Amino acid sequence: MEPQRPSLKPAAASLSLGQYHISEEYGFLLQNPLKELPDHYRPWMEIANKLPHLIESHQLQAHVYKVLPRSLAIPFVEVSRNLGLPPILVHSDLVLTNWTKRNPEGPWEISNLETIVSFPGGESLRAFILVTVLVEKAAAPGIKALVQGVDAVLQHSQDTLLQALQQVRLSIQDITRTLAQMHDYVDPDIFYTVIRLFLSGWKDNPAMPVGLVYEGVATEPLRYSGGSAAQSSVLQAFDEFLGIQHCKGSVGFLHRMRDYMPPSHKAFLEDLHSAPSLRDHILTSGAGSCLIAYNQCVEALVELRSYHINVVARYIISAAAKARSRMPSHPSPHAPEDRGTGGTAVLSFLKSVREKTVEAILHPCA
């Protein structure tokens, strides 16, 4: 038997998605993002709505700032503090709250979705955001199911647990199929040379080694990681539910990325971690059908992580090689070629995470 995870909640306590601002239907997505802010914020909205044009026409600085002007830094930091988020573009800004349906009654398809605020990158940028929105939506049934699974463990209900595990597997497989749409809509060259620059932060970024000065906020530069898939709560939720234990280095990065999540979503992950161990329950209950269903969930997660590695290889590693071949004597100063937008050595990190997921496969007790 594996060591029991400490429980910070009463033994009979169950999880309710609503208390974490998570929707059974939409998952971590904000259900109805505002398209416009109140009139007081009109100057901000006017700039936001014209952002790609302002940057591309050089009316707004397109190069990396060394100092964020006081007029931007102070309100940005104030709003971020109220939201419990760092003052930098994060996954919840770019994806969770940045979508709308063209036809509210229409299907969940990329043709019926639109971003609220955009950046340079054209259709590839739009698709990058909206495919990620669809990934979050595909995860919603699995997030609902894993909460049902936690309750089933608490209630010792094997039938309910089996159904929950089967739904988690189906959801993970749907995520993988949805992620494949990146190849249909997002151009690797545009992602690497344009989109990636706007997602890179000022921590672990050689282009801004000391960080960014937020004028009027701090005298010393501040360092924040760029937008990263690890800032999505989806895979971390599945990891916590399934009890997948990553290596120390990966855990450090993944937990740091939780500080870039909405506080209620971070609290959800922490409470999932403190719930009774699903793995221990399956190993001690003798329910062979649940063990098989658990392993199928883990195998689906391995397949998803393998597919993610292939996506990253195409959009970062191969795109970097192509960019070097065009300008061999002028390497890009903006972001290191082997690092993700969150600052990790991306392939080694993803492969380590996948290997630890493989190791989570359970074997029946003799």
Image (spheres, helix red, strand yellow):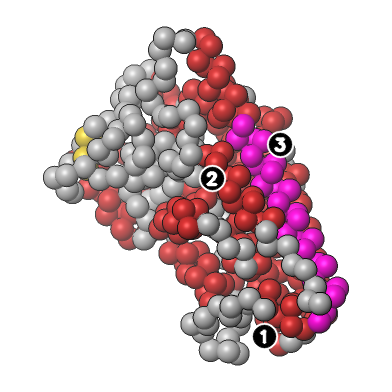
Measuring 25% from the left and 45% from the top, which residue is drawn there?
222
Asked if the residue under mark 3 is in contact with the one under mark 2, i.e. CB atoms within 8 Å, the reply is: no
Q: Quadrant of residue 307?
A: top right
Q: CA distance from mark 1 to mark 3?
A: 38 Å
Callout 1 crowding tier (Cα within 10 Å): few <14, some 14–19, many ≥20: some
What SS does tag 1 mark? helix
Q: Is residue 175 left or right of residue 127?
A: right
Q: Would residue 291 be counted in the magenta stretch?
A: yes
Q: CA distance from mark 1 to mark 2?
A: 34 Å
Most frequent secondary structure within the magenta stretch: helix
Q: Which residue is mark 1?
A: 154
Measuring 27% from the left and 39% from the top, which residue is drawn there?
211
Q: Which residues are magenta?
A: 286-313
Mark 1 or mark 3: name the one nearer the start of the chain. Answer: 1
Q: Is residue 294 visible?
A: no
The kind of residue on which mark 1 rests is: Leu
The kind of residue on which mark 2 rests is: Phe
Measuring 54% from the left and 72% from the top, which residue is drawn there?
273
What SS does tag 3 mark? loop
Mark 1 or mark 2: name the one nearer the start of the chain. Answer: 1
Residue 214 location in percent, x, y? 22, 43
Q: Which residue is mark 2?
A: 349
Residue 91 location in percent, x, y? 49, 48
Mark 2 or mark 3: name the one nearer the start of the chain. Answer: 3
